[in-house]
Image (cartoon, rainbow, N blue to C red):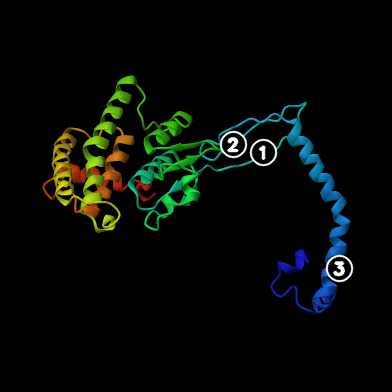
């Protein structure tokens, strides 16, 4: 049957008459035949299950990471039987929020796969009992590890990933480079990302009825962000990327914040040539589509 099924028309009535006859039998008779066939295989299945259980219970568990999706191990001569369980860490994510997007871009730059669990913020999923059991703060992203440990906060997740997968380096190599990237990331978070979120929360209709909006405060935050992007335009006149001549987490934080600012009308101006050049450079990277 396997051979005939690969041939166009190979399972027609005259090619497999016995199979065609069996298909024409009442359901009850076919079920009885299947039960009989499976009964012959049951002892073998039970034996395999017992052997697998003994192997799992008697073995030593060791966690390995498949770097860039590749894993290789040489069996020891006295231990020829080993089990491999493949798991992809789930990332509780949202397609539109900037914080999860930072992590997605970071993972994409590292060439790492992950299981994406979409959490619908607009529908209130982050406030559900199910998600609050994952993160009591009701925020995304959350990266769940193989042992059940859950990591929150995008920058902490990126630092964890960097420690496990240092290539390509996104948090710097030398102490000086690391300090410069860290300083730029913190500056972007406090002087750009936070006021952008305040502008969004206090001026956008999405938050109407959800929080007490102070429109004047939101507009003040928006003007602060516009001024900070103007300062960074001058900074980028002498720097290829946010923290130097190499792409880093600082560029991910800056780019996702700039993209997020669109919802409150924050965009690079035509006169900000250096900022536009930098934005287009980052947008052309495959990770920008993550």
First of labels 1, 3 by sequence position = 3
Q: Nearer the viewer, residue 7 or 205?
A: 205
To which residue does mark 3 refer?
Answer: 33
Q: Nearer the viewer, mark 1 or mark 3?
A: 3
To which residue does mark 2 refer?
Answer: 71
What residue sits 37% from the left and 46% below the top?
Answer: 101
Disc 2 from disc 3: Cα separation: 43 Å
What residue sits 82% from the left and 69% below the top?
Answer: 31
- Residue 250, image quadrant: top left
What residue sits 11% from the left and 47% below the top?
Answer: 271
- Residue 106, image quadrant: top left
Image location (x, y in percent) of residue 171 = 36, 30
16 left or right of 109? right
Number of other residues with Cα within 10 Å of mark 2, as a class: few under 14, some 14 to 19, many 20 or more:
few
- Please tell me whether mark 1 sits on a helix, a strand or a loop: loop
- Compared to residue 260, the image places residue 74 above or below, namely above
63 left or right of 257? right
Q: Residue furthest left?
A: 271
Disc 1 from disc 3: Cα separation: 35 Å
To which residue does mark 1 refer?
Answer: 84
Please say if the residues under marks 1 and 2 sit with CB atoms less than 8 Å apart: yes
Image location (x, y in percent) of residue 38 = 84, 59
- Compared to residue 44, the image places residue 123 above or below, namely below
């Amino acid at each position: 049957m396997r051979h005939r099924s690969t041939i166009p028309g190979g399972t027609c009535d005259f090619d497999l008459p016995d199979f065609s006859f069996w298909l024409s039998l009442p359901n009850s008779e076919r079920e009885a035949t299947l039960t009989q066939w499976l009964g012959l295989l049951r002892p073998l299945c039970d034996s395999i299950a017992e052997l697998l259980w003994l192997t799992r219970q008697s073995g030593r568990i060791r966690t390995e990471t498949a770097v860039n999706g590749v894993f290789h191990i040489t069996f020891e001569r006295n231990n020829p039987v080993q089990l491999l369980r493949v798991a992809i860490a789930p990332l509780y994510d949202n397609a539109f929020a900037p914080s999860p997007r930072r992590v997605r871009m970071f993972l994409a730059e590292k060439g790492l796969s992950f299981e994406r669990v979409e959490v619908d913020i607009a529908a209130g999923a982050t406030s559900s009992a199910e998600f609050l059991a994952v993160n009591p703060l009701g925020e995304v992203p959350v990266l769940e590890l193989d042992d059940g440990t859950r990591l929150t906060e995008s920058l902490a997740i990126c630092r964890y990933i960097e420690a496990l997968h240092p290539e390509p380096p996104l948090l710097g190599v030398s102490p000086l480079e690391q300090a410069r990237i860290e300083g730029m990331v913190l500056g972007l978070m406090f002087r750009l990302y936070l006021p952008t979120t305040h502008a969004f929360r206090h001026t956008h209709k999405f938050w109407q009825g959800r929080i007490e909006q102070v429109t004047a405060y939101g507009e003040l935050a928006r003007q602060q962000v516009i001024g900070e992007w103007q300062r960074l335009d001058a900074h980028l006149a002498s720097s290829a990327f946010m923290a130097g001549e190499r792409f880093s987490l600082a560029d991910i934080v800056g780019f996702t914040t700039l993209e997020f600012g669109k919802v409150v009308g924050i965009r690079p101006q035509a006169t900000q040539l250096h900022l536009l050049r930098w934005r287009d450079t980052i947008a052309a990277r495959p990770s920008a589509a993550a």
